Amino acid sequence: MKTKSILTRSILLVLLIIEFLLAACEPAVTPTVTETPVVTESPTAEPSRSPISPTQTSATQTVMIVSNREGDELSDPEAWDGREINSYTYQILEILVSRYSMDLIASDEIIEEELTPNIEIIVSTSPTDDLPAIAERHPDIQFVAIDHPGFSPSENLSLIGEHGEVNQQQAFMAGYLSALISDDYKVAALIPSDVEDSETLTEVFVNGARFFCGACRPLYPPYNPFPQWETLPLNYTSTDFEPTIDALMAKEIEVLFVEGQLASAELFTYLNNWDVMFVSDSSLFFHPWMQLVRNNWAGTVRLDVETPLEEIFPLLLEGQGNHDVPVRMVVTATEGGLISEGRHQLFDEFAEDLQNGLISPETVP
């Protein structure tokens, strides 16, 4: 019985060995691999975009100031004279572009073919007749017209300034200021003789003074009628202005308005011989030679372009145009202390009435 059991186990062991050997002798079967097809276009790929030029990727957002007024020197904006809208506009734009990390460039005209995509805003202080048409052709640029009578605002064209003659308003307010700060209403003006609006400038200066002093009758001699005025050619010489100044000063003028186009070192050097206060629409800050009359400088009457431009600038950057902002006359360069706080306030109130249309330079009071 025991022998039979051993025999059975031996047979089973032999069979297992044979089965193992047979399995080892079978050829290896290579598994079948299913090839995944190559996807040539991803369904989630972003749509293709137009290539961006190096100018667009590297150029900083830019503001352009455009001016071709006579006497402007765009190569040196600090030297701008004449109507100083240009100088003050340039100064506030320098501040604004610095605040928004932008660039500022100056040009004497708009060349449409050279308007690059990085130009965001164009500010024009020049009487550019075709500016509305240019703005219409370039809807991605915001345009600002300063002192452009006759224009209408649009989606990308904004206006800053009264719809009238700025130089006439300045002469009008200069007349008011001259009478305001005088003690005996002895005020006078020097007006260019060879400009188109010479006669009008004289009339509005007189009207401005009389809005304050009425008949402007002095209490002390000499008892001449006031305001007084004289004219000089733009290209004057000392032989032109010396007899004129001598005749005026013989009437003991207290305040003299010098129209900005006549301002020069030669003229003010001669005027410095008299103890007289000066009012102008030209600022001594832009003319170093005018420092010699600093102590007699009452103030500069000009258009306040800075305040409205600063207010609308963020809106322009967001593409919001169509602004029409009236501008008030202000008196600046008053460091000489010749205008008291109360008189300054009266000037501001009168300027606000002018801005609101309650008074007119052409009106005879």
Image: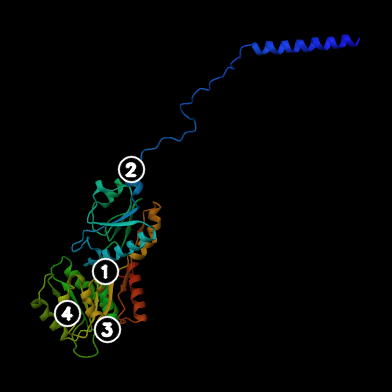
Q: How many numbered marks have been drawn onto this rendered protein structure? A: 4
User: Which mark is drawn over residue 169?
Assistant: 1
Q: Cα distance, mark 1 to mark 3?
A: 20 Å
Q: Amino acid at mark 3?
A: Ser
Q: Earlier in the sequence, mark 2 or mark 1?
A: 2
Q: Earlier in the sequence, mark 1 or mark 3?
A: 1
Q: Cα distance, mark 4 to mark 1?
A: 27 Å
Q: Is residue 216 above or below residue 39?
A: below
Q: Amino acid at mark 2?
A: Ser
User: Which mark is drawn over residue 352?
Assistant: none
Q: Cα distance, mark 4 to mark 2?
A: 56 Å
* In this view, the mark in front (4 or 2): 2
* In this view, the mark in front (2 or 3): 2
Assign a secondary structure to mark 3.
loop
**CB under 8 Å between callouts 4 and 3?**
no
Q: Earlier in the sequence, mark 4 or mark 3?
A: 3
User: Which mark is drawn over residue 269?
Assistant: 4
Q: Nearer the viewer, residue 347 or 99?
A: 99
Q: Earlier in the sequence, mark 4 or mark 1?
A: 1
The image quarter in which residue 185 lies: bottom left
**Residue under label 3:** 182
Q: Cα distance, mark 2 to mark 3?
A: 63 Å
**CB under 8 Å between callouts 4 and 1?**
no
Q: Amino acid at mark 1?
A: Gln
Point out residue 323 in the picture as x, y percentages from the top left corner. 36, 56
Q: Earlier in the sequence, mark 2 or mark 3?
A: 2
